[in-house]
Image: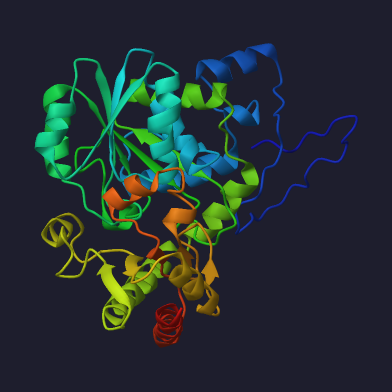
């Protein structure tokens, strides 16, 4: 990047140096100067690489995107967005039109569900929500105008595992785009394009960046034309990721593999421990033999069952309140993937827009919690949960 020329207002250009920075420089500039109109034309026409206006792209976004491209084996350069929902929105709004139909998994992230049930219908885009493990039901939901099938590999927050092979075959047969949200599983556990996805989305905010200080998303498509459409849509609608968030995300991703392994190992231990506690009705973890989709999880994920554990307490809201108050040292917060363990209560956060009956149908009672396991000492973490569950029993 050229930095040797100053301006009247900023006369002191960056000093030249025979050495180079070890850490990726932060590039907060909103705009980049070209030498001539011809040069600007060349940049916009693709004959010359360069940055123009940061809503259209900037160095820090490209650095993070290339790292994610390698992780996902993306065939074309992916696009950074201002949040995970920005990536989902780019797909659902940028690749559809009034009169189209979209099918989503019935246990998607709460805001994805809300977009499916409220925003898309308002724009004339019909939607259906179907169990992603039931291929027969998925086939029955397809219409001539169906354009997209949006699913998560492991659902949020009930941790059900989609029939990816069946869905990929169905999408290929019918010409529908298979869009996979790989946030929970990450490319460390699951390669979306290898499995037949047409588009992958991520909330980089979560485990990939890993420190709860980044708001960022990513989307990439197998087809170049679709990838280009997504890029243009995100630029036009202002879904651009900030340079600072991208810079922080790159720093966080440097330790991703280490964090993934540690958090996953502790999740296995915590799931086993929770299953022994009086007052816990059920424990949900794909690596456990009692998980309803355990065989499918083993086939898709191998030994990488990730860092998310869900469980259900006996009791209702009073027990839930007692549990969170007694979970000393842990954050009750609607997020996941942080270095510290966080506890989420879907009924009061991610899925609060659903009716109580709708949550019950999905298995989310007032006693249902989702745990994002972090990097704490495993025994210390288990001790906190022992204390907190005991408080819930006494409530």
The residue depicted at 50 percent of the width and 68 percent of the height is 339
Q: Is residue 321 visible?
A: yes
Q: Nearer the viewer, residue 326 or 175?
A: 326
User: Compared with residue 318, is residue 122 higher up or lower down, i.e. above or below?
Assistant: above
Question: What percent of the width, then of the height, locates residue 311?
Answer: 32, 68
Question: What percent of the width, then of the height, locates residue 51?
Answer: 61, 29
Question: What percent of the width, then of the height, locates residue 206?
Answer: 47, 55
Q: Quadrant of the N terminus?
A: top right
Please give the count of numbered marks on the rendered protein: 0
Q: Is residue 94 visible?
A: no
User: Compared with residue 221, is residue 277 higher up or lower down, i.e. above or below?
Assistant: below
- Specify the quadrant of the image occupied by residue 373: bottom left
Question: What percent of the width, then of the height, locates residue 247?
Answer: 59, 50
- Specify the quadrant of the image occupied by residue 325: bottom right
Q: Nearer the viewer, residue 255 or 295?
A: 295
Q: Nearer the viewer, residue 388 or 380?
A: 388
The residue depicted at 16 percent of the width and 33 percent of the height is 138
| Image-based side of 222 in relation to 22, left or right | left
């Amino acid at each position: 990047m050229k930095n040797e020329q100053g301006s009247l207002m900023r006369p002191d250009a960056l000093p030249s140096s025979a050495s180079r920075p070890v850490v990726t420089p932060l590039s907060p500039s909103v705009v980049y100067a070209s030498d001539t109109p011809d040069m600007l034309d060349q940049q916009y026409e693709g004959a010359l690489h360069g940055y123009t206006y940061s809503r259209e792209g900037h160095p820090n976004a490209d650095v993070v995107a290339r790292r994610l491209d390698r992780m996902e084996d993306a065939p074309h350069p992916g696009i950074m967005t201002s949040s995970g929902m920005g990536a989902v929105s780019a797909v659902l709004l940028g690749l559809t039109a009034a009169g189209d139909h979209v099918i989503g998994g019935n246990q998607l992230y709460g805001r994805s569900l809300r977009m499916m049930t409220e925003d898309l219908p308002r724009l004339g885009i019909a939607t259906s929500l179907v169990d992603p493990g039931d291929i027969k039901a998925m086939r029955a939901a397809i219409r001539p105008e169906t354009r997209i099938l949006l699913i998560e590999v492991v659902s949020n927050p009930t941790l059900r595992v989609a029939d990816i092979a069946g869905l990929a075959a169905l999408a290929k047969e019918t010409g529908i785009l298979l869009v996979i949200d790989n946030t929970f599983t990450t490319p460390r556990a699951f390669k979306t394009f290898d499995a037949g996805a047409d588009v992958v989305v991520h909330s980089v905010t979560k485990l990939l960046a890993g420190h709860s200080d980044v708001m960022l998303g990513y989307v990439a498509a197998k087809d170049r034309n679709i990838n280009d459409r997504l890029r243009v849509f995100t630029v036009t609608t202002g879904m651009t990721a900030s340079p600072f968030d991208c810079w922080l995300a790159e720093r966080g991703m440097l330790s991703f593999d280490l964090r993934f392994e540690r958090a996953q190992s502790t999740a296995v231990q915590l799931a086993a421990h929770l299953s022994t506690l009086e007052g816990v009705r059920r424990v949900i973890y794909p690596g456990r033999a009692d998980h309803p989709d355990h065989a499918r999880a083993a086939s898709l994920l191998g030994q990488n069952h990730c860092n998310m554990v869900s469980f259900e307490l006996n009791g209702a809201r009073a027990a839930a309140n007692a549990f969170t108050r007694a979970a000393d040292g842990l954050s009750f917060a609607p997020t996941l993937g942080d270095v510290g363990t966080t506890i989420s209560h879907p009924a009061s956060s991610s899925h609060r827009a659903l009716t109580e009956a709708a949550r019950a149908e999905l298995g989310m009672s007032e006693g249902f919690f989702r745990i994002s396991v972090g990097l704490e000492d495993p025994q210390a973490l288990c001790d906190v949960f022992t204390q907190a569950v005991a408080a819930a029993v006494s409530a």
